[in-house]
Image (cartoon, grey):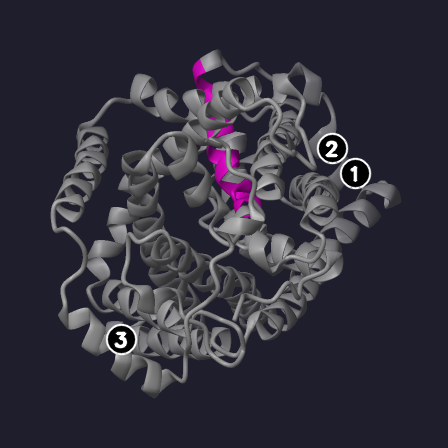
């Protein structure tokens, strides 16, 4: 039994859009405009530039995903190129990032819904956590029904997101075309604004970069994509380009309706815009925030489970995580993801640990680029269905280095020490795992019971389908 290659260009595009577009477009414009010294052309240029940088980095990952078209391709690739310890470190970072991120997103969904009933005061903690757990487990069960079911939901979620962003964009365009002085005046003398310094631009780029992290989902689910050599690069180019254009138009619409000062002092620019453009729309705003997050939650569960699946196939985790149910999906891996995310929701204080994982996420991207250069040099004759332009690899490395060191240089604090400690804990866990000489015997009994309970069976080894980067 294998994971099904059931996702074509359309569904992959919807998953990419659903994973990329989140509540960041509602919040990030505030920080970007602030760090741009209220300079509108600079702010919009940063959004456009980060979109181009995202395409560059995504195409580098596309070479990995098309050369090794497996679920969890990045883990497989790092283990083959840089060794087991580096691959385990990436596994350590990704799993923490996934279950903490999923927990945070579910809490945001629950808070935005519950807050409607408690106008003027904070939402109570117990109902919020209960609703967050209900949302999490609903999507966990949905994920076990197969990748086609997940793709169907993300298609619906993406259409909602597209509709909202198109509504915001078109409203701004109509207001500007009509030429109302109130709206047009905000763009007058925009070029005369003060230019930000290099430090401020670096901070703005760092903020926008988090709004373009979704494309990494394609390298994780590469094993379930039809014709990955054609579909992945095409989806990344078209998908990220559309997202970039929508981000630009949305920001222009924000600036057409709200003043720069209103954007700076707004907790959520999207909600403030909605209340200004469509008064008495609090319920609609809460629904839209929830809709924007639900698709991201679904993609997070699928991504985390495929990381479990890949690690299990490589022997890092018990074999139970790579076993598939009747819907050709790693059900136990998905349930494990939901359980860990539930712990994050119940002990909501640990959600704040997600910020300590961000440094590691950029480190993974840097390591992948180093691995890509290494395999280009050591094994130039490996079949590469898609080969990215070499300067893109160096550009992606430079971007990763910038995202890693810019926050440390700009504002060093104790959190950066915690991030380094987190990475060292990953190496410590690898050493412990490597010296346990295999998994405990009790796992064999647990595996048998789980096979009966979840009706799962071992997946086939796909190693023979992948060209080895180090042939003997």
Let me know if residue 211 is in the magenta part: yes
Q: Which residue lies under the disc numbered 1?
A: 181
Q: Which residue lies under the disc numbered 3?
A: 447
Residue at 42%, 36% (x, y): give it. 80
Q: Position of residue 1 (x, y in %)?
A: 52, 71
Let me know if residue 11 is in the magenta part: no
Question: Is there any visible trace of residue 246 in the rendered image?
Answer: no
* Disc 1, SS: helix
Q: Which residue reaches farthest right? A: 178
The reply to whether dot 2 and dot 1 touch (C-beta < 8 Å) is yes
Q: Nearer the viewer, mark 3 or mark 2?
A: 3
Q: Is residue 450 left or right of residue 79?
A: left
Q: Is residue 383 left or right of residue 184?
A: left
Q: Nearer the viewer, residue 367 or 55?
A: 367
Residue at 66%, 62% (x, y): give it. 158
380 in relation to 317, above or below? above
Question: Is there any visible trace of residue 332 in the rendered image?
Answer: yes
Residue at 57%, 69% (x, y): give it. 147
Q: Which residue lies under the disc numbered 2?
A: 185
Neighbor class of circle 2 (other Cα within 10 Å; few <14, some 14-19, many 20+) is some
Query: Mark 1 or mark 3, which is nearer the start of the sequence?
Result: 1
From the image, give the main secondary structure of the stretch colored magenta.
Answer: helix
Query: Mark 2 or mark 3, which is nearer the start of the sequence?
Result: 2
* Disc 2, SS: helix
The numbered disc on residue 441 is: none
Magenta range: 199-216
């Amino acid at each position: 039994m294998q994971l099904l290659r059931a996702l074509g260009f359309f569904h992959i595009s919807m998953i990419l859009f659903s994973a990329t577009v989140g509540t960041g477009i509602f919040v990030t414009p505030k920080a970007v405009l602030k760090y741009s010294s209220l300079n509108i052309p600079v702010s919009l240029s940063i959004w456009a530039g980060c979109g181009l940088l995202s395409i560059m980095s995504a195409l580098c990952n596309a070479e990995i995903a098309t050369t090794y078209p497996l679920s969890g391709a990045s883990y497989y690739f790092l283990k083959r190129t840089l060794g087991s310890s580096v691959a385990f470190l990436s596994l350590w970072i990704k799993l923490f990032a996934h279950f903490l991120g999923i927990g945070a997103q579910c809490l945001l969904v629950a808070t935005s819904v519950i807050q409607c009933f408690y106008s003027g005061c904070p939402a109570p903690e117990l109902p919020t956590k209960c609703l967050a757990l209900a949302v999490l487990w609903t999507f966990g069960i949905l994920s076990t029904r197969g990748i086609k079911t997940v793709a169907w939901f993300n298609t619906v979620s993406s259409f909602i997101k597209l509709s909202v962003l198109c509504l915001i964009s078109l409203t701004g365009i109509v207001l500007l075309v009509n030429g109302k002085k109130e709206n047009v005046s905000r763009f007058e003398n925009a070029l005369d604004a003060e230019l930000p310094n290099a430090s401020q631009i670096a901070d703005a780029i760092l903020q926008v970069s988090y709004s373009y992290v979704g494309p990494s989902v394609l390298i994780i689910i590469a094993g379930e994509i039809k014709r990955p050599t054609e579909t992945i690069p095409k989806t990344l180019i078209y998908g990220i380009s559309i997202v970039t254009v929508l981000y630009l138009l949305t920001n222009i619409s924000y600036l057409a309706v709200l003043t720069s000062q209103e954007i700076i002092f707004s907790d959520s620019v999207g909600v403030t815009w909605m209340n200004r453009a469509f008064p008495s729309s609090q319920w609609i705003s809460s629904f839209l925030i929830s809709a924007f997050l639900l698709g991201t939650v679904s993609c997070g569960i699928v991504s985390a489970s495929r990381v479990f699946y890949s690690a299990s196939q490589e022997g890092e985790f018990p074999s139970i995580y790579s076993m598939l149910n009747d819907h050709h999906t790693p059900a136990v891996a998905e349930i494990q993801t939901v359980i860990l995310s539930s712990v994050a929701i119940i002990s909501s204080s640990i959600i704040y640990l997600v910020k300590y994982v961000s440094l590691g996420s950029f480190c993974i991207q840097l390591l992948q680029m180093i691995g890509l250069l290494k395999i280009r040099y050591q094994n130039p004759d490996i079949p590469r269905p898609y080969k990215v332009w070499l300067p893109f690899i160096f550009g992606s490395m430079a971007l990763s280095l910038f995202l890693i060191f810019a926050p440390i240089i700009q504002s060093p604090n104790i959190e950066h020490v915690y991030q380094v400690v987190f990475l060292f804990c990953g190496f410590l866990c690898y050493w412990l795992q490597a010296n346990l000489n295999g998994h405990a015997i009790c796992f064999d009994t647990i595996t048998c019971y789980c096979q009966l309970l979840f009706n799962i069976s071992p997946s086939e080894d796909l190693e023979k389908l992948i060209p080895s980067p180090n042939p003997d």
